[in-house]
Each structure stands twice: as C-alpha cells, then as structure tokens.
Image (spheres, rainbow, N blue to C red):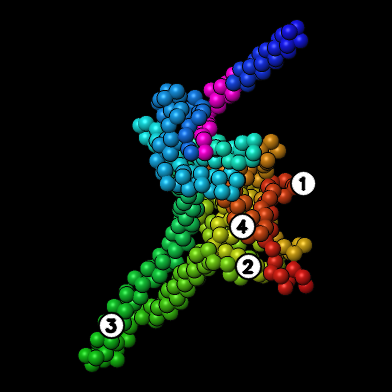
Amino acid sequence: MDRTYAELVHYQEKLEAQNSELESMRGFLESVLSSVSDILLVVSRTGTVEQLSDSLAARLQQNAANLRGGQVAGLFRDQAALNAALDSCRTNRAPVTLELELAAKPDPMPYEIIISPRSDERGRVAGYVLAGRSVGELRHAYQALEHSHHELKAMQGQLVRNEKLASLGRLLAGVAHELNNPISFVYANAHALERYATKFETYFDRVADGASRAELIALREDLRLDRELRNLREAIHGARDGAERVRDIVADLRRLSAGGDGEMVSFDLVEVSRVAADWVKRGRAGGVVLQHDGCETLMVTGRAGHIQQVVMNLVQNALDVLDGQPDARLCLRHFTESGFAVLEVSDNGPGIAPDVQAAIFDPFFTTKPVGQGTGLGLSISHKIAEEHGGQLRLCPNQPDGACFRLELPLPQAESTS
C-alpha cells in the first residue's frame, strides 16, 4: 500500500508538472498569436480553423472565438485557388505561396499567403499553417512612389526645356544682330540701285525719242551718269557682299543645328565648337577676344547637337563672368590625350572659389543672381559628357581664371593608332 501510494503521489506530481508546462506553452502561443501584426492561421487537414492571430480577427472585424471551428475557405474570396493550394501543399508536402484577398470589411485586402504543411507524430499531414502579409499597403506605397517619380521626371524635363529655351534666346539675339547688318546693307544698296535705274531710264528714253548728240551729252552731265555708273558697280558689289554674308550666316546656322536629332554620328569637334562659341559670342556686346587653338580638325562620334549645347553652356558661363572686364579673353583649345579628344574652355576671369568647386556640377547650384540662371547648365553638360563615354570636369591647378575640360573618346581606329 505504501509503495502504491508513493507511486500515485509521484504520478500526480508528474502530471501537475506537465500540466504546468502545457499551460506555459499555451500562454506562450497565445501571446505570439496576439502580438503578430501579420495574419496567422492554424487549420486542420479538412480546412477547419483551429487557431488564429488577433490581427486576423481585427482585420475581419470579428471575435476570434467565433472564427474558430469555421472553414478557412470562407475567410478568403478566391476559395477555389485556396483549396487548390491546400491540395498542392498536402500532396507535395512543401510550402505553397499565393496571393489571396481577405474577405475584410469594408473592402477586401490583398495578402501574400504562405501555406506550410503541419505533420503529426506519424509524419502524415495533419493540417496547415497559413501566414500572410498585406501587399495592399506596399502597392499603395509603390504607386505613390511611381507617381512622385513621374512628377519629378516631368519637372526635370520642364527645367531642361527652360534651359534650352534660354540658350535659344541667346542664340536668336546673336542671329538677329548678325543678320541686321548685311540685310540693312543690301536694303540700302537696293534703294541706290532703284535711283540709278530711274536716271538711266530717263537717259535711254531720250535716246529712243531721237534726241540730238548735244542734248544727250548735256543730259548725261546733268544726270551725272558717269559717276552713277561707277556707283552702280559698287552698289552691286555691296549687295552681293551682303547677300553672301547672309548666306554664310545661314550656313553656320545649319551647321549649328546639325545633329540636333540625337543620332550618333561622326562629326568634327573643332567645327562644332567654333560655330557654337562664335554664335554665343555674337549675341553678347563687349570686347571679349575669342581664340581657337590646337587641332584644326578633330573627329569624334556622338550627338553633335548635344555637344553644341555643352560648348554653348561653357562659353556662355565664361562670357557672364567676363562681362565688363578689360582685356577679357576666352580660349578654346583642342587636342588629343590618352585616347580622348579634349576641348578646354578657359578664360582670364576671376575663377571659381575653392569652396564652391565641389558643387558646381550639382543640379540647381548657381552663383548667378536670382532670375539669371537655372543652375542646370553644368549639370546637364556633365550628364551629356557621361552619356558619350567621356567626362566634363574643372581643370586642376588653374593659375588664373577658370578652365573646363571636356573629354570625349576617340574612334577606335584613332585611339589605337
């Protein structure tokens, strides 16, 4: 009896210890289920809900106790897809991932559900564990980010167009100035030619009427036809010079606009730089001396119109800092170095302060007064150089003034020769 009683007491103590351990485990599981933010479901082999997280009950706006014992398929909208996933998980004994909409109120919520098999002591599938994470909020965040990205791209495009329009305005000022002189010269000579024609018509009318020799000689002296004949030839030469000047200006404009469609072509960097720099200078008043040094021709491959934009930006910036400075000089030097075609644009202005040199290529950074610069010229030029496989940088150790160096890769045959 004593031994039996002792065994019963020992067995009772063992049961109490196991019961305490079970209660502790139950409390642990309940705390986990109540604290997870994602949804969690434990279902039987037949799809009956055995346990669920508080977050799922809150999303469904129902009591967790009322959901236990129900069918898991009723919690989601696409029941056929869920049942097929449960069958696949049971057959393959491997997790299955799919996207389902939780039948929440007022609107369904999309979730990424991972279904994992739950095995019994014999290794058979006894049920499933479903864990889900909401993808709706993530999608909303992606949509908001994409919308902001499109707005940013549109704003950047508008700013780039504004910068190009500013350059176009400066170019048109130069065109108007250059065309005004030869056109005015042609216009003045046309008036002179009209006056000369009237005098010669008067003389030849008298010839046709049969005037005497003496009368014609007197009329010729009165109309000063000998002098007007010499002036007529000079007026013709002057009109021709003006017309040729207009023709040259138009030819320069055509070269300036060549390659503006963005196609990769072979072009002469020296010619592109000369035309672009000359036109920017034409639009500015002042006695800046523009000098071209180095190679007479330098062929590269790229978008000629884009490189023209880079040169115009560099020259325009240099002319801005040289405005009003006596003995102002601007030099464009072309040469080759280590497989690159190099253009250096240097001036004898005040230079760039060391404390701003690191920021000069940053978008919207400018040292110009408000309303006189967008701060995008150098940033766009830097990007264009990189798109061509080269770079745009500030020349180091410049003794005076500022110097920008544009490097573009030479064609393969030249760079290896």
Q: Which residues are magenta?
A: 27-45
Q: State the residue position of label 4.
A: 387
Q: Nearer the viewer, residue 200 or 86?
A: 86
Residue at 36% across, 81% down: 225
- Amino acid type, mark 1: Asn
Q: State the residue position of label 2.
A: 301
Distance from label 4 to label 3 (Cα)?
65 Å
Q: In the rendered view, does 28 fall on the left or right side of 256?
A: right
Q: Mark 3 or mark 2, which has the lower sequence index? A: 3
- Point out which mark residue 201 bears: 3
Q: Mark 2 or mark 4, which has the lower sequence index? A: 2
Q: Nearer the viewer, residue 301 or 67?
A: 67
> Is residue 84 something that shows in the picture?
yes
Q: Is residue 257 above or below residue 215?
A: above
- Mark 2 and mark 4 in contact? Answer it, CB < 8 Å: no
- Mark 4 and mark 3 in contact? Answer it, CB < 8 Å: no
- Secondary element at tag 4: helix
Distance from label 2 to label 1 (Cα)?
30 Å
